[in-house]
Amino acid sequence: MALREILSATQSNGRRRDLQSITTEDQYLKEFKYYVISSFEHRVHRLFFYVGEMADQALEVVRELDPSPCCQKQLQSSYSQSKERWSFDLLHHGIRDIFEWLNKSDLDLAQRDWAYLLDCMEDKGLGKLMIMLDPTPTTDSNIKPQPWDPTPVRKLVHEPVINLAKSTIPLFKLSRVFLQKLSKRGMNQIRFPVFTEMSSNQLESFADIPMRVSEKLADLVSALDGADTSYGLATSHDIEKIARTIKPVFESPWLVALHYIVPLIPDTNGSPTQNYWKNWLIMWNTHFDLAICQFIDAAKGFENTPG
C-alpha cells in the first residue's frame, strides 16, 4: 500500500505532462525536475516487480509445505530454493536502490551508469585499438574475440594505416581523461548540493555522454580497420568525417562542467579549487583541439600515401 501511495504521489504532484513540457527550463524545480521524478518512478516500478516476484516465491513455498491431506508435503527443490534466493536478492537490491536514490544528487543520478560505460568505452575503444596495433606476430591476422566484443579483432598490417591509427591515440586518451575527471573518479568525488542548476534536458544529455563518445570512437576504430582491409582503395574522407564529429560531442558536457559543476566546488583552506578546474578544462580543450587537427592532417596525408 505504501509503495502505491509513493508512486501515486510522484505522478500527481509531479504533473508529469506539465513537467515534461518544460524539461529545458526546470532547473530551479529541484526535486520536481522531470528527470529526478522519472528516475524515482523507475525505481518504484522496478521495486513493485521485485515485490511481486518475492510474493510468487512465498506462495510457491507455502504450496510445497502444505500439510493438508490432499497435498503431499515435499522438500523444496534446489531450483526452487535458488529462485527464492534470487527473488530475495532482487527485493533487497530494489529497497537499497531507493534509499541510495534519496541520498544522491541529481548529478549522481545522471552519472549512475558512468562507471560501467567508461569501462566499456575503454575496452571497445583504446583497448581494441591497442590490440589492432600490437606488433606481436600471430599465425594469422585475426585474434580471438574479446569478452566485450564477439567480433574477432583484426590486426592492422599496412604501415600507413598503422601510422594513422597511432595518431588517434591522443584522442582516445584525452576522451578518457575528460570523462574520468567529470565522474566519481574526478571532480564528482566532491560532495555537491543535492540539486544542481542543470535542467532535466541537460541532465539526460549529460547521462548519455559516455555512450555517445564510445560510439564515435568505435566508429573511428571501424573506419581504420576498413582502411586497412581495403588498402589502396580507401580514402581519408570517411575517417576525416568521423573525426570532425567527435569534438561536437564534447561541447555540451564541457560547457556544463564549466558553468554548472565547477561553480559548486567549494574553495577550501584558501585553495583556489574552482580556478584549478577552470584552468584544467581550458587546458584540456586546447589539447583536444590540437589532437583533432593533428589527426585530420594525418588523415589527409594518408590519402596521398603511395600504395
Image (cartoon, rainbow, N blue to C red):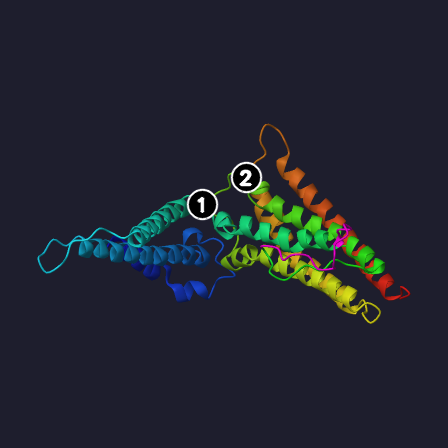
Quarter of the image containing the N terminus? bottom left
Q: Which residue is outermost to the front?
A: 139
**Amino acid type, callout 1:** Lys
Foreground pick, 263 / 139: 139
Q: Is residue 144 magenta?
A: yes
Q: Quadrant of residue 49?
A: bottom left
Q: Main secondary structure of the magenta part?
A: loop
Tell me if 87 is positioned left or right of 203 in this view: left
| Residue plotted at (54% across, 38% down) | 190
Foreground pick, 290 / 11: 290
Picture coordinates of residue 61 (x, y %)? 22, 53
Q: Which residue is outermost to the right?
A: 306
| Residue 104, numbered circle | 1
Foreground pick, 247 / 66: 66
Label 2 sits on residue: 189
- Which residues lie in the magenta part? 133-147
Q: Measure the C-alpha gap from mark 1 to mark 2.
A: 12 Å
Tell me if 129 is positioned left or right of 75 in this view: right
